Image (cartoon, rainbow, N blue to C red):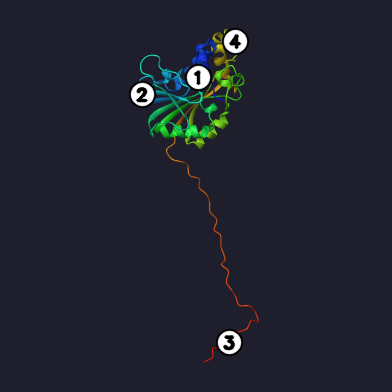
Amino acid sequence: MAVDVVDMRAFYASPRGRAAGHIIGRALAGLWPSARGLRVLGVGYATPYLPLVSEGAERVAAFMPAAQGVVRWPQRGASATALVDPDMLPLPDAAYDRVLLVHCLEHADSPADVLSEVWRVLSPGGRLLLVAPNRRGAWARSDSTPFGHGQPWSRAQLRALMRQCLFSPENWLDALYVPPFGDRLLPRSAAWWEKACGGLGLPFAGVHVVEASKQLHRPVTVTRHHRVVRFNPVLAPEAGGALPSARRN
């Protein structure tokens, strides 16, 4: 069951949510420091992070799943948000150059259908940036945060899913090592947790951050065919059978 958009907004307005958004946003901005001249789409609840990865973009939009709800974004100017079905995006093929997927895949009824739609709307050579809760992390076990709802993922599961949907994972980052407990403690200790645990490469981060590129051609599996010799049955006369009688004039 998807988290309501009102709860999402309240979480990111809290001290704990702001700290989590800062940690994840820093990882995203490191992978996509500039989007000059590109078209950028956020799917899920990506609005806290879109400003960090869309600097100089030609066009920016935010699509929110119907089960979650939608809020206006940005606060000033024309709204760039829309309520959609994430596995049936109302876009033509190759409409965007980059897609940011946050708070979406873990709530999808069919994650493969969602990624297939993202593949369709990405331009040739387009790139996907995905944030998904880590099944080993403490955040996936805390239902007081959006990361504790839906299906968490292991790295192996994400890799298999993305390859199935014709994406090539290229950059993997782990973020959000800090425990999701205590609003006062979290902002002060977050930097220490990320530096200490990230430097050791521990597998207990709160989220996976994956950058992948769109494959243009489906891999072809070469199958070796074995030649099968088939014998066609031939009707043979029975032994001792009577010969046909001679034709009389």
Q: Position of residue 249 (x, y in %)?
A: 51, 92
Q: Which amino acid does label 4 sit on?
A: Gly
Q: What is the spatial separation of the Cα atoms under label 1 and label 4, in whole angstroms?
A: 23 Å
**First in residue order: circle 4 vs circle 2:** 2
Q: Name the residue under label 3.
A: 245
Q: Is mark 2 on a helix, strand or loop?
A: strand
Q: What residue type is labelled 3?
A: Ser
Q: Is residue 59 left or right of residue 229?
A: left
Q: In this view, does 63 lie to the left or right of 203?
A: left
Q: What is the spatial separation of the Cα atoms under label 1 and label 3, in whole angstroms?
A: 94 Å
Q: Mark 2 points at which residue?
A: 59
Residue at point 40%, 25% (across, down): 40
- Asked if the residue at tag 1 contacts the one at tag 2, i.e. Cβ–Cβ closer than 8 Å, the answer is no
Q: Name the residue under label 4.
A: 182
- Asked if the residue at tag 3 contacts the one at tag 1, i.e. Cβ–Cβ closer than 8 Å, the answer is no
- Kindly report which numbered mark, 1 or 4, lies closer to the viewer in this rendering: 1
Q: What is the spatial separation of the Cα atoms under label 4 and label 3, in whole angstroms?
A: 107 Å
**First in residue order: circle 4 vs circle 3:** 4
Q: What element carries label 3?
A: loop
Q: What is the spatial separation of the Cα atoms under label 3 and label 2, in whole angstroms?
A: 93 Å
Q: What residue type is labelled 2?
A: Arg
